[in-house]
């Protein structure tokens, strides 16, 4: 009998590993969010810089951060150590990052304005570089910990939760300290605060380092700037997505950079910023859970535009919030969280689609390149937004060291947190109306891409041009040859089932009748059934929720997304190659996304098996000895996880009937009758598959006979 340990060794991550990984994002955001939310007000109210100068520093260093990400992305995996390629950066990079972070918030009193500017500018630039060399390997680590796309979704979901909790906790600790910035010990207070945050961050990085193991070898592919730019020029959806991201991030960071001023001078208490952050975070998490439904009902572009409209409404409400009205401010920030969370989640879902579009249009697949471009554009938007917000409040008369701000300065704060970001969000919404890749278009494109990849894999195995693999499309839509035409057609049947519909019995019987081999699922239900009962129902509601909110709300994980998509594509390609190899000599293939991979294969029949839940539960109970409740839990987990993996790896839903030639309810007929139905239908559909044996061989038993063909696939 297999043990839980066996399942773990197959790649399932423990809750402790997922939690430890999420602590790395807590560590990241103790420093990243501190600079994003509070550095601007620190520069003006404590270091004494003008708002305009503070905004310039903020803007330039944010844009530099985009370049630093590219530098780190090209560097971090070049050194192999006994701990791997990624984890050592957490071990050795965390302490320098913490030191630079503390120094950034420790401007000595008495420095001249020029030296104060130089101190903050240089240390912020160093901080952004040090942060990139920790954050990029951290983001890449999830793909190195497991190849299971479901587990990777849990890791990214845990990261999103850590991000949300850290933002609220950090604002609760730091925001009240800005209520009075005139005290004698205020500079020391911030040095001690950031020192404490730095120490905690290093400890959390070390915990992440200790428990996150690199078990998946890193790919050797590098980003080719020339190939990427060539792809981008022909990728209209990506261009519009990048333009929309620029304006959207400029909008969000205009408000983020000066939001602390709003809490202090409009709402009347710096500590209120915590309540605003909490409202935004709760809204972001709620909308993240609804994104799949939004995508289904509105489509990705329309969902993005609707969420951007909510952001515009939120910013307008923020502008009109009555002086001192915390309750109205909370409502406005809640709306902002819904809009920003929705646009952020949909943006990266659409970004994945543009990677497919780029491959479909140009033949170049560039996950890393396209995400690098989007990441850089986002950082530029962040910098320009922060710069614009600070410039506006400075122009309206804000003086950080003044005891009382003028009415004009407070109006400037309202404009910088309301009207200006509303205008930028509106620009993002208008730009995205030009994004022309619909859900239906993407589905058709993905289907075409998989057909092309399958054709390419077959042509490569025979060493011929891809055009010779394709024949004139038959009436059933099949046009891809799996074998040289002189060798004829061997039977290929793919079977996908809802768990308990009988494929494990029906599949081998069909293979025997057709005289071909039977290929079971890569991760079969029988294997799962051997694991301890407790492990079968471990996929709980929280795990599913974690997968739903993957990366939602995280603002600095672009390359992690790219690597995750790249790894999924690599796994899918490997599976496709295996399926094509199995099919070459004829096979009955269960699962493995065979109906998609072999969707256009000449001589292939695609079958989906289903049955009523009560019948499926009864069958699983009979086979495994589980109780009815345990069997039903197992069925629900199996069906859901297998469908999720198909969506992650191939962007398709295996429960879509249109991909199948036969959909059979096995609850109303016997297994023998189902076998006869499939075999009979196959023989009537492909009668030539039994015409004669391949040259130089004799059939044995029920081995298939192959049809003569007028020409060779390979000349």
Image (tube, helix red, strand yellow):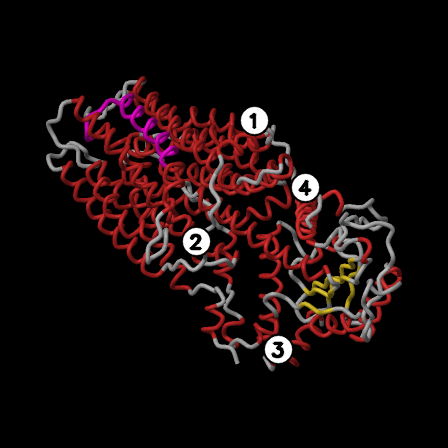
The residue closer to the viewer here, 555 or 40, is 555
Q: Position of residue 642 (x, y in %)?
A: 60, 61
Bin the neighbour count of mark 3 within 10 Å (Cα to Cα): few under 14, some 14-19, many 20 and up. some
Bounds of the magenta span?
A: 46-68
Distance from label 4 to label 3 (Cα)? 42 Å
Chain-order first, disc 4 or disc 3: 4
Residue contact between numbered discs 4 and 1, judged by CB atoms under 8 Å: no
Q: Is residue 304 left or right of residue 201?
A: right
The residue where tag 2 is placed is 142
The residue closer to the viewer here, 432 or 311, is 432
Give the answer, above or below, for where 344 lies relative to 265: below
Q: Position of residue 423 (x, y in %)?
A: 47, 24
Tell me the mark number nearer the camera, choosing from 2 and 3.
Answer: 2
The residue where tag 1 is placed is 430
Chain-order first, disc 2 or disc 4: 2
Q: Which mark is residue 628?
A: 3
Residue contact between numbered discs 1 and 3, judged by CB atoms under 8 Å: no
Distance from label 1 to label 3 (Cα)? 54 Å
Distance from label 4 to label 1 (Cα)? 25 Å
Bin the neighbour count of mark 2 within 10 Å (Cα to Cα): few under 14, some 14-19, many 20 and up. many
* Magenta stretch: includes residue 64: yes
Label 2 SS: helix
The residue where tag 4 is placed is 445
């Amino acid at each position: 009998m297999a043990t839980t340990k066996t399942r773990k060794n197959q790649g399932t991550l423990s809750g402790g590993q997922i939690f430890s990984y999420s602590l790395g994002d807590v560590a990241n955001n103790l420093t990243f969010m501190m600079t994003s939310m509070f550095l601007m007000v620190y520069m003006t109210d404590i270091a004494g810089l003008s708002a305009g100068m503070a905004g310039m520093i903020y803007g330039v260093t944010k844009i530099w951060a985009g370049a630093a990400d590219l530098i780190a992305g090209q560097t971090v995996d070049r050194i192999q150590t006994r701990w791997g390629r990624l984890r050592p950066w957490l071990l050795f990079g965390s302490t320098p990052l913490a030191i630079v972070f503390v120094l950034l918030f420790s401007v000595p009193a008495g420095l001249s304005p020029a030296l104060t500017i130089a101190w903050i500018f240089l240390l912020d630039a160093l901080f952004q570089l040090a942060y990139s060399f920790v954050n990029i390997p951290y983001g890449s680590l999830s793909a190195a910990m497991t190849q299971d796309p479901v587990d990777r979704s849990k890791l990214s979901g845990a990261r999103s939760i850590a991000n949300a909790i850290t933002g609220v906790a950090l604002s609760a600790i730091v925001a009240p300290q800005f209520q009075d910035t005139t005290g004698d010990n205020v500079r020391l207070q911030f040095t001690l605060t950031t020192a404490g945050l730095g120490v905690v961050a290093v400890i959390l990085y070390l915990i992440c380092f200790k428990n996150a193991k690199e078990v998946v070898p890193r790919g050797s592919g590098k980003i080719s700037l020339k190939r990427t730019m060539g792809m981008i020029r022909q990728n209209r959806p990506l261009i519009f997505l990048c333009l929309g991201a620029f304006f959207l991030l400029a909008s969000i960071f205009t408000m983020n950079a000066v939001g602390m001023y709003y809490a202090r001078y409009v709402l009347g208490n710096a500590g209120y910023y915590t309540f605003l952050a909490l409202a935004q975070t709760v809204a972001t998490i709620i909308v993240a859970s609804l994104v799949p439904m939004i995508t289904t009902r509105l489509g990705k572009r329309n969902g993005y535009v609707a969420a951007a409209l909510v952001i515009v409404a939120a910013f307008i409400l923020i502008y009109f919030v009555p002086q001192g009205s915390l309750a109205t401010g909370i409502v406005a920030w809640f709306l902002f969280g819904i809009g920003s969370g929705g646009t952020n989640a949909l943006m990266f879902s659409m970004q994945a689609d543009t990677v497919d579009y780029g491959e479909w249009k140009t033949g170049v697949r560039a996950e890393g390149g396209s995400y690098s471009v989007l990441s850089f554009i986002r950082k530029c938007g962040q910098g320009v937004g922060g710069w614009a917000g600070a410039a506006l409040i400075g122009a309206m008369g804000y003086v950080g060291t003044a005891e009382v701000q003028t009415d004009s300065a407070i109006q400037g704060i309202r404009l910088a947190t309301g009207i200006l970001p509303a205008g930028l969000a509106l620009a993002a919404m208008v730009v995205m109306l030009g994004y022309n890749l619909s859900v239906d278009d993407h589905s058709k494109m993905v289907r075409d891409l998989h057909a092309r990849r399958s054709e390419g894999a077959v042509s490569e195995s025979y060493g011929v041009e891809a055009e010779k693999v394709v024949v004139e499309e038959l009436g059933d839509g099949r046009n891809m040859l799996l074998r040289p035409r002189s060798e004829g057609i061997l039977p290929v049947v793919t079977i996908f089932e809802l768990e308990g519909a009988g494929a494990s019995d029906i599949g081998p019987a069909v293979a025997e009748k057709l005289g071909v081999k039977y290929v079971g699922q890569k991760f079969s239900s029988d294997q799962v059934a051997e694991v301890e009962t407790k492990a079968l129902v471990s996929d709980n509601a929280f795990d599913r929720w974690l997968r739903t909110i993957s990366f939602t709300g995280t603002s600095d994980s672009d390359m992690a997304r790219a690597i995750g998509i790249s790894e999924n594509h690599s796994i899918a390609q490997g599976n496709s190659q295996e399926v094509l190899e199995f099919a070459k000599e004829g096979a009955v293939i269960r699962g493995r996304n065979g109906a998609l991979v072999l969707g256009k294969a000449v001589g292939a029949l695609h079958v989906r098996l289903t049955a009523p839940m009560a019948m499926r539960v009864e069958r699983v109970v009979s086979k495994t000895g589980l109780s009815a409740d345990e069997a039903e839990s197992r069925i629900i987990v199996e069906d859901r996880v297998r469908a999720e993996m198909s969506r992650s790896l191939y962007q398709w839903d295996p429960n879509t009937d249109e991909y199948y030639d036969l959909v059979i309810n096995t609850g109303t007929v016997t297994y023998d009758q189902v076998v006869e139905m499939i075999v009979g239908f196959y023989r009537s559909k492909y009668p030539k598959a039994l015409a004669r044996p391949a040259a130089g061989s004799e059939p044995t038993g029920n081995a298939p006979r192959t049809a003569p063909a007028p020409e060779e696939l390979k000349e």
